[in-house]
Amino acid sequence: MYIQKDWQIINEYDYSDIELDQTMVSELDLAGRILMSRGLIDPEQRKTFFAADLSMLHDPFLFKDMRKACEAIIRHGRAGSLIIVHGDYDADGLTSTALVIRALRRFGFLCDHVVPDRLLDGYGLSDSGINRIIDAGASLVITVDCGIASVDEVDRLNAAGIEVIITDHHEFRPELPRALALLNPKLPGHGYPFDALAGVGVALKLVQALDIMLDGGNKWINDISLAALGTVADVVPLIDENRIIVSQGIEQINKGAENVPAGICAMMDLCQKRNALNAGTMGFTLAPRLNAAGRLGDVEPALRLLLSDDASQTAKDAEILNELNKQRQSLEQEIIEEAVNRIEEMPDSGNRNVIVIAGRNWHPGVIGIVCSRLVEQYSRPVIMLAGDNGSNLRGSCRTYGDFDILAALEAAAEFTISYGGHKKAAGLELSADNLEAFADAVEIYARQHMDQLDLRPAILADMYLDESDLNIENARSLAALEPFGECNRQPLFISEGFRIIQWMLVGNGRHVKLVVEGKSGKHYDGIAFSMSDADELFTAGDRIDLLFSLEINEWQNRERLQLQIKDIHLSQSGDDFIDRPWLADGLYKNNWTLSKIAEKYSLGVDELMPAGSDFKAAYQFIRTRFASRCLETDLKILARRISSSYRIELNAFKLARIIEVFAESNLISLEWLGDDRCKFSLLEVNSKVRLEEASTYRRLLSEGEI
């Protein structure tokens, strides 16, 4: 069921101690005002942000061990020794591997790669990977996107006479690997000024430094599109060097530069994204196809794609990745459907602050994605586990809001075999026998540390926009803020007081296309993706407020302004009884009579007193639509839906009385989540229920007729 989100304006920067030139602020375009709101007060800061030029990249030799790493690579390369690049199976790791291999080949060095199998080897250096390295006769190993935690594995390589260079960007442990060189921007005392590079970003800095030492003529720039793809895929903050890498890489791809790897061009052609790529399409089209290879256990087609310059070969590999991605999507959908059914069938799922669910045959390569989808659907943290018969359960955790999921795992540590991660996401392993005890321990921790109001879905906007700001010029200025991503999110706005002119379902009924009229009488096009659940709530003529991004829709060489709508609220009517029904509800709960409340709001008592048919309609609607599900909703929305379905006049105040009667009669479980939002589910009824015995019903009877 559609749940409206709470809207919050982001206050990122406190200007209270700064005297701003309001004339200067008013003269800025919308993009400039956004940057001001995000703390870029100085015009030079904004100029630097918009520039995103390669000349602004940091010196790679600021890494303390960079020169030592380059000298070792050159020494082994010139000696004709085999250099192995050990990567990872995700898009960041694959692009990192390809980028370094392409550079080593360009220098004429003998090289090969080892990438672990996600399902058989797991993440990072493993015994099987080390065996492959030793058997290949390597003299030097360069890790990319991994290795900073591989203390024992590096010792084993050293013992075999193999030197190791670690390039990584992950968090480190107190004991560091005894490698020849460590390149990780997070390491304290290692000198690098930007600590948020992706793994491929660190690899790019290594290749940049090699070009400098070997007088390679800045050919590292040829592969910046690879670095852009891996950076976007790894969802690192798109600020500082990451913003430059992604901006320049996307520009290189969109211009059709000759040096763009043939594999990226092949994927672009397959996805029909030539000349129209941005960070969003890169993250949602190209990256998933690379990740699909690693998720399903075979990375070789992905590496061939990224390493080959043969257009026919890359076209074949792009097709393979496309099919793997379709398999991944199919598996994901099957698991989502099964997981949702299982959650809905759990008798207490609606009362759980953290959803813990396990499936025996769920594919381990996709449960992390499914876990994230379930978090979005249920607006609460999710822990999802998988395992075969007789094996332990392994899985992923994703949090919701500010809840610390790693701390929850620590509270349930006695029931786990292992776990690790960070506040927002983690992985774990446990015995199937301990699943119930583990879930209970996590829930106990959550009840102690999670406010129910934190589970209310919210959406953040940058600012309110007047209708005069809704124009193509402003939309075009916002495009200069791209690439959007972590720490540089796409700006969102709130505008109020539109009237719906046209409302229609599109995209096989999944999306909503609408035309709205502003207060000026001007019409605006809007698209609301995946909001078909709102179809019963709104119709032509309704007054609404919108939360949206401002975009330009190009069709047949014509540009039109488009509002990409993220959420919709009914506009305030100016009547507190309609706009803020919880106020009247509070008066009733403080023992105001219906007649006194009616007098305050200039209503008739019959507008506050539910009729017998209202009880019947509400129960039928809930039982029909949500028989086995926990329902979280605003009563104002639910009342509107019931009224629409049964053609009755049911307001939120009446519905609150009905819901209370149902709860007192043990027809439903009920929990209030602030204001008029509540969570309830139907209870099993084994005998005849008499609503007349509920205290709220008796009170209503004493004040009028039902």
Image (spheres, rainbow, N blue to C red):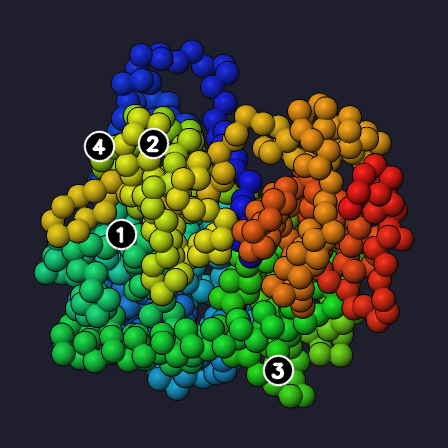
Q: Residue at x 39, y 86 (%)?
A: 135
Give the numbered dot on residue 518: 2
Given contact means CB atoms under 8 Å apart, are the residues at marks 2 and 4 in contact? no
- SS type, badge 2: loop
Give the numbered dot on residue 360: 3
Give the numbered dot on residue 278: 1
User: Disc 3 residue type?
Assistant: Arg
Residue 555 drawn above or below residue 508: above
- SS type, badge 1: loop
- Residues at marks 3 and 4, CA–CA distance in whole angstroms: 54 Å
Give the numbered dot on residue 473: 4
- Residues at marks 2 and 3, CA–CA distance in whole angstroms: 53 Å
Mark 4, Cα crowd under 10 Å, few <14 / some 14-19 / many 20+, is few
Observer-nearest of 418 and 606: 606
Residue 78 on image: x %, y %: 22, 69
Q: Residue at x 61, y 44 (%)?
A: 649
- Residues at marks 2 and 4, CA–CA distance in whole angstroms: 18 Å
Residue 216 on image: x %, y %: 15, 57
Q: Residue at x 68, y 37 (%)?
A: 607
Q: Quadrant of residue 515?
A: top left
Mark 2, Cα crowd under 10 Å, few <14 / some 14-19 / many 20+, is some
Q: Nearer the viewer, mark 3 or mark 4?
A: 4
Q: Nearer the viewer, mark 2 or mark 4?
A: 2
Mark closer to the chain start, 1 or 3:
1
